[in-house]
Amino acid sequence: MAKGNPGWGMPEMLTMAPPTLTEFERTVRRLKLKPHQYVSSEELRAWVVRNSHSRYVPESLLTAWGIKVRVAVEG
């Protein structure tokens, strides 16, 4: 009878969590947008304005729309 963990040193692929989508990615999917359509989408822009301070939004999109994000400084 072998002692110890026979899988020691092996990757635990079965226990890894599947990748999850960000709220931004879910919104883009719900709106059925392709990346080249992001800037021209009024619905996406409205979502970004409401959520840019609490959700991930690609920096390039914020820049394209001239949206500034507040940065919280801990101290």
Image (tube, rainbow, N blue to C red):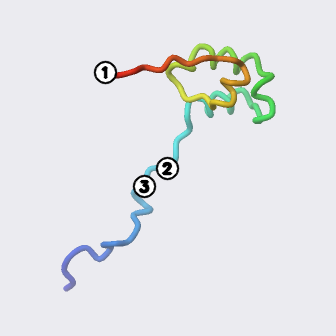
Q: Position of residue 60 (x, y in %)?
A: 68, 31
Which disc, if any, is residue 16?
3
Residue placed under numbered mark 2 in the picture: 18
Disc 3 crowd rating (10 Å Cα; few below 14, some 14-19, many 20+) is: few
The percent position of residue 56, horizontal first and vertical second, equals: 55, 29
> As rendered, which of 70 and 12 lies closer to the eye?
70
Q: Which residue is mark 1?
A: 75
Left or right placement of residue 7 versus residue 29 in this view: left
Q: Secondary structure at mark 3?
A: loop
Q: Position of residue 54 (x, y in %)?
A: 50, 21
Of the numbered discs in the image, which one, if any, rests on residue 9?
Answer: none
Rounded to the nearest angstrom, the CA distance separating label 1 from label 2 is 35 Å
Q: Amino acid at mark 2?
A: Pro
From this view, report whether residue 10 is shown above or below residue 35: below
**Compared to 21, does 45 lie above or below?**
above
Label 2: state its secondary structure. Answer: loop
